[in-house]
Amino acid sequence: MLRGKIKLKPCSVCGILRRYMMNGIAREEGANFLATGHNLDDEVQAFIMNIIRGNIRGIVQEGIVTKATDPKLIARIKPLYFCLDKEMRLYVELRSIKHVKRAYPYVKFSVRGFVRDWLNQLEGRIIERFGDVLGRKA
């Protein structure tokens, strides 16, 4: 129906739909905040992506609490903000928590995938731990 008319990558469509659904459910439940699973790796990636895109507003708005920019939106909190991705993976494995292990199929189209791979290479070669660099001590 919209094929060829709108130039959106699969990640954009997925992100828009996911945020719409999460916000709608939070509103239905009467929530004041919506907790997301974003971790330190996600936040560093978002920061780098905002720099690449020249998105100053995105840089300023990032943080543990993201305020709602519209009355219809629910503010977001990130309780895992200071947790590293590998720490979260280890916790899930040690606790035998069921989770989806399959990689996101459209990561090859995303800037985030590129930034994530670059940061992982950088961490492995130069920086011992991103958390230490960002002021979070293990």
Image (spheres, rainbow, N blue to C red):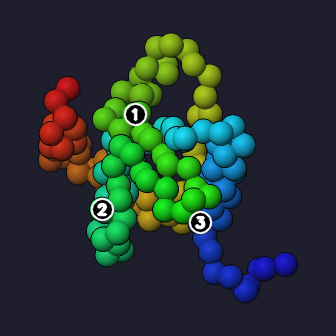
Q: Is residue 89 left or right of residue 122?
A: right
Query: Which residue is the site of mark 2?
Result: 60
Residue 92 vertical placement versus 58 (above, below): above
Vertical placement of 49 versus 26: above or below? Answer: below
Label 2 crowd bin: few (<14), some (14–19), many (20+), radius 10 Å: few
Residue under pointer 1: 80
Residue beneath the point at 35% across and 38% down? 81
| Residue 113 visible, this angle | no
Pointers 1 and 3 in contact (C-beta within 8 Å): no
1 or 3: tag closer to the N-terminus: 3
List x then y, in percent, for residue 117. Answer: 37, 53
In the picture shown, does residue 47 fall above or below 135?
below
- Looking at the image, residue 132 sits to the left or right of residue 32; the answer is left
Describe residue 132's horizontal placement relative to residue 68 as left or right.
Answer: left
Question: Residue 104: x and y, percent?
Answer: 59, 49
The residue at the point 54 percent across, 63 percent down is 70
Sequence-wise, which precedes: disc 2 or disc 3? 3
Question: Which quadrant of the structure image shows residue 89?
Answer: top left
Front-most of 49 and 26?
26
